[in-house]
């Protein structure tokens, strides 16, 4: 397998895509969830309802629109084009919104009385308190980004820039393929996700418990 494909290059590409996807999703979704959970403004219920409405549509429906948008932004064959459509999702906003709502209101009121701004409350008080939920969203996002095949294969056309999920199946030709090599590559694709869950399962389970409550 190591002789057949540049496995470490694919591995590096997958790590790069997963890390940036997790970072931007946690940042943007938490920024979207906090005002929906804790701030009162006109149209809040409407905005939240529109976000929930996106759950009705499968992700595959957005492929054409996303590809047209990525093309117009000249992001085809770039990692940004792979990452951008996945950095904000309704599921992540819903989970983080619920996490923010579980923080006692008295704690926020005390911070406001002490003169803390909304940004200070958000960054120094709220985010540390919802660490298990952030970890849960991060783990789910990392696994989803690591295993995603369809969208990267649409956006990327240069084999050197393929993530691992696409690069392994790149060995599957029209008239033949090496089943053993593909199986070995698939095993390497699965191992990092298993290790990630093994070392972060306590955060994941605490976040899921909070989501169920």
Image (tube, rainbow, N blue to C red):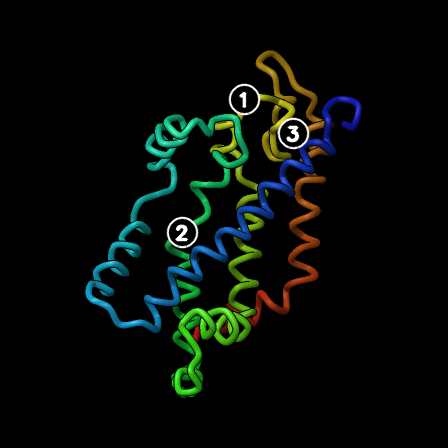
Q: Nearer the viewer, residue 67 or 57?
A: 67
Q: Earlier in the sequence, mark 2 or mark 1?
A: 2
Query: In this image, 190 relative to 207: left or right?
Result: right
* Residue 28: quadrant of the picture: bottom left
Q: Are marks 2 and 1 in contact (CB under 8 Å)?
A: no
Pick whichever, 198 or 40, lies toward us.
40
Question: Quick one: SS at disc 1?
Answer: loop
Q: Is residue 123 above or below residue 158?
A: below
Judging by the rendered image, the residue that carries numbered circle 2 is: 89
- In percent of width and height, residue 18 lies at 58, 45
For disc 1, the marked residue is 157
The correct choice, above or below, for 74 with respect to 89 in the image is above
Position of 139 with respect to 188 (left or right) is left
Judge the density around disc 3: few (<14), some (14-19), many (≥20) Cα neighbours within 10 Å. Answer: many
Judged from the image, the secondary structure of the residue bearing numbered disc 3 is helix
Q: Name the residue at 23% across, 65% down.
A: 45
Q: Residue at x 64, y 36 (%)?
A: 13
The residues tagged by marks 3 and 2 sit, at their Cα atoms, a distance apart of 27 Å
């Amino acid at each position: 397998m190591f002789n057949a494909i540049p496995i470490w290059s694919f591995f590096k590409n997958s790590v790069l895509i997963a890390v940036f996807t997790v970072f931007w999703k946690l940042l943007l979704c938490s920024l979207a969830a906090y005002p929906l959970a804790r701030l009162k403004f006109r149209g809040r219920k409407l905005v939240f309802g529109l976000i929930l409405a996106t759950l009705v549509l499968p992700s595959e429906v957005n492929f054409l629109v996303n590809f047209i948008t990525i093309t117009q932004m000249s992001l085809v064959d770039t990692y940004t084009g792979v990452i951008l459509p996945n950095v904000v999702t309704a599921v992540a906003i819903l989970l983080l919104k619920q996490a923010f709502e579980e923080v006692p209101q008295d704690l926020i009121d005390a911070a406001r009385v002490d003169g803390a701004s909304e940004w200070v409350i958000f960054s120094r008080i709220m985010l540390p308190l919802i660490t298990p939920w952030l970890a849960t969203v991060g783990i789910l996002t990392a696994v989803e980004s690591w295993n995603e095949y369809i969208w990267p294969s649409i956006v990327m056309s240069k084999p050197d820039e393929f993530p691992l999920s696409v690069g392994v199946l790149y060995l599957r030709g029209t008239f033949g393929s090496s089943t053993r090599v593909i199986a070995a590559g698939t095993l390497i694709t699965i191992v990092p996700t298993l290790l990630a869950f093994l070392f972060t399962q306590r955060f994941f389970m605490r976040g899921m418990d909070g989501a169920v409550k």
